[in-house]
Image: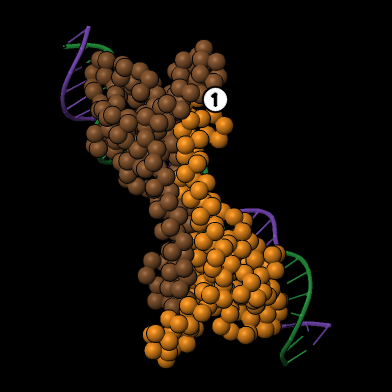
Chain colours: A brown, B orange, C green, D purple
Amino acid sequence: MKRDSRLSGVLHILLHLAEQREPATSEALARAMGTHPVVIRRVMAGLRNQGYVCSAKGHGGGWRLACDLAAVTLRDIHVALGSPALLGIGHRTESPGCLVEQAVNAALDRAFEDAQALLLARLGDVTLAALSADCHARLVARGGACSLEASHAA
Amino acid sequence: MKRDSRLSGVLHILLHLAEQREPATSEALARAMGTHPVVIRRVMAGLRNQGYVCSAKGHGGGWRLACDLAAVTLRDIHVALGSPALLGIGHRTESPGCLVEQAVNAALDRAFEDAQALLLARLGDVTLAALSADCHARLVARGGACSLEASHAA
DNA sequence: CTTCATGTAATTTATTTTGTTACGTGAAAT
DNA sequence: ATTTCACGTAACAAAATAAATTACATGAAG
């Protein structure tokens, strides 16, 4: 079972956008993320629709942040990506006729819902601003010499 | 992202086994679960190795429970299945060179670990005996007329 | 009016999961 | 004994998913 890393990837992109004032093209982002520009556009489309970023065509175009980092949480981004399943395990059948399976589903659901609620709450506790601050703290801790952008130069 | 339903399926099987004293063949279980006997054997192999069930060859052979339902939790079964990923989302990279990605991973990890720990704890709170009792309660609530096995007759 | 860059649908390719076949081992029935 | 039954496993095939790519359209800057 492969885990969905879209949230991780999008956060990565957003924080990089926060570091530069000029728009970043899908091609540049794709190079940094090791993927294809069209994939970037696909995943960013959701964020644009929710107003977290904006895009511009033509010369000097690309992606820019369009939100206050302090007002957006990781949960917001998760929702903007379409609220993909947080849990990796689930039911065999959604509404089974078998009583045994109903009991199994009920027991698992209780556990699943609690875990999911906790995870959403934790994601809701972290703002993009906090994440960005953590980035800069790490930059200082590491010596402060290199730009945040340098890590994807190669 | 498709969710793994092995835990759900195996619990279903175990509770059915709890209802009958004669062994159940892989073929019978496969019919009930809508899959192939070899798939049943594959998934049950882990449980057998951990001693939760035992299997017998030849006439009258098949699968039987080999554990005290009151002493085994859903968490134990999850572990016996190889502890598949509980979460549906994860990192892009495990040990990134990029500071931004390190910060993203750190933030997500905190949330992930807490949710995972809660889920494991909840699974650890439910014994197979409790699940089985819930099955019987549902059977009574529904009228008590039909056998637990009837649900898979068709 | 050409170049650049996004928007999106359609297609192809790769990966993962699931199902199937085939053959081996051992136990019970005849 | 030998046939039948059922598990054990590896190898193979098929199906479902996800990702990458292509293709073409739109619109903005030079």
The answer to whether any part of residue A42 appears in the image is no
Q: Residue at x 57, y 63 (%)?
A: B124
Q: Is residue B135 above or below residue B36?
A: below
Looking at the image, residue A119 lies above or below residue B99: below
What's the residue at 35%, 23% (across, down)?
A18
Q: How crowded is mark 1: few (under 14 residues within 10 Å), some or many (20 or more)?
A: few
The residue closer to the viewer here, D30 or C9, is: D30
Identity of the amino acid at label 1? Gly
In percent of width and height, residue B118 lies at 51, 55
Question: In screen coordinates, is B18 left or right of A55?
Answer: right
Quarter containing the C terminus of chain B? bottom left
Q: Which of A83 and B111 is in front in this view?
A: B111
Secondary structure type for disc 1: loop
- B105 or A61: nearer the viewer: B105
Which residue is rendered at x = 39% and y = 41% of the image? A125
| Left or right position of D25 against B122 | left
Q: Which picture quadrant has residue A16?
A: top left
- For the point 62% across and 85% down, the residue is B21
Q: Which of A154 and B26 is in front in this view?
A: A154
Label 1 resides on the chain identified as B
Residue D13 drawn above or below residue C24: above
The residue that disc 1 covers is B97
A59 vs B73: above or below:
above
Does residue A109 show up?
yes
Percent x, y for residue B61? Answer: 68, 80
Which quarter of the picture shows residue B95?
A: top right
Residue A64 at x, y percent in the picture: 29, 24
How many marks do you count on the picture?
1
Q: In which quarter of the image is residue B53?
A: bottom right
A17 left or right of B132 in image: left
